[in-house]
Image (tube, grey):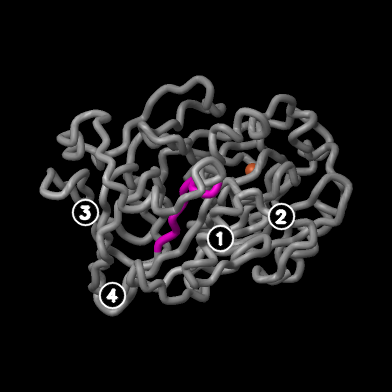
Amino acid sequence: MAATEAPPTQKKSAAKAWDDWTASTGIPVHEGFYIQDLRTLQLGWWEERQCNAAFLKLAGQEGVSEARVTEIPAGQSLPPLKFALDEVVYVVEGRGITNIWREPGGQQTSFEWQKHSLFRLPRHHYRQLSSTQGGQPARLLHFNYLPITMTSVPDPEFFFNNSFVSTDGDSSELATFYSAATAVQRPDREWGGGSANWVGNFFPDMRAWDKLATQVNRGAGAAAVSITFPGAPMTSHMAVFPPFTYKKAHRHGPGVVIVVPAGEGYSVMWPEGQEKQLIRWQEASVMVPPNKWWHQHFNAGGAPARYLAMHCHPGVDVYSESVENLERDQIEYTAEDPWIRETFAAELVKKGLEPRMPAEAYTNRDYKWTPLKV
Ligand SMILES: [Fe+2]
């Protein structure tokens, strides 16, 4: 299914104010289940922001999260913008620099980013984004919780260039805001094999990030890193899993936006008891599993695949994201539909390849995978 086709099960969005605002900008709003490639996604001119841009309104965002693509022309700077919410940015293409300040004339900080960087832009601050790579525009994927916030405050002007000045903390803290991320112990987010919980506002290269821990519950010997942006409501994680394997199906609440930093494969998504959707992905693909749809990721390429998930709003998390019962929110290999295994084998056979799924994984629920080494 093409990304621009409206999925038959897509509900009317609860975020009417956000829908109205995005429509008023005149730039493209892409619907569907996924985006094949952000690098070639159709954008449109946004006069107010002085750039080409587009919104993603994929089925699973469901009025919770905003995803938006911005293009900065080679060697140019976008106009400064103050935004009332925290925002996370993933760099799809290009290289550049961001300047941040709280109030006009106040202290500034800046940091350089590159393709595959991940960083946070703090709420109630001005940001100015510039491309520093000659000959190639920068493309950025922005992620925030504006749609669900606008269900309470439906006035877009409240969120942009509002004169409110935060008194939270000291603006001198900006000097260290983009320091290197640090590892922390978070027992609630431990995965087997040790801690991979990192706190920071700048992650230089998610394609190269190698500080991972084994993600034992999800199979395939996968590894992962959990990311916290300090003081912001959003969290993230990135999973890495080996060639010619696939992870266990699972499900959770809406609003989780997934982007692929590296790899080649596909995912299958389906509502309980209904038809399965197959979504092919590679670097710069985006997908959003709809609320409580099962989804399962398959690595059909010759290298470890990576996907970066920007998590749903913590308020939504409370009632639908947390896995309370693995029997209800995860499908073990031993219990899966044979179609899953057969389709994976058929996909690889087309390329003269075969799965590296050990036979015992399908008979022994407690099969111990060899952890992925990255
Ligand atoms: Fe998921």
SS of the residue under disc 1:
helix
Q: Is residue 52 left or right of residue 133?
A: right
Determine if the magenta segment contains residue 143. yes
Residue at 57%, 64% in the rendered image = 282
SS of the residue under disc 3:
strand
Q: Amino acid at mark 2?
A: Lys
Q: How far from the left and from the top, in percent, is residue 250?
A: 72, 40
The foreground one among 57 and 202 is 57
Residue at label 4? 74
Say if 329 sits above or below 49 in the image.
above
For marks 4 and 3, the one nearer the N-term is 4
Nearer the observer, disc 4 or disc 1?
A: 1
Residue at the bottom extreme? 135
The foreground one among 318 and 289 is 318
Nearer the observer, disc 2 or disc 4?
A: 2
Q: Amino acid at mark 1?
A: Asp
Nearer the observer, disc 3 or disc 1?
A: 1
Q: Amino acid at mark 4?
A: Ala
Nearer the observer, disc 4 or disc 3?
A: 3
Quadrant (top left/top right/bottom left/bottom right) for the N terminus: bottom right
Q: Residues within 10 Å of mark 1 (few under 14, many from 20)?
A: few
Magenta residues, start to end: 140-147
Residue at label 1? 20
Q: How far from the left and from the top, in percent, is residue 350?
A: 75, 70
Q: How far from the left and from the top, in percent, is residue 173?
A: 19, 34
Residue at label 3? 99
> Residues under labels 2 and 4: Cα distance?
38 Å
Answer yes or no: is residue 195 visible.
Answer: yes
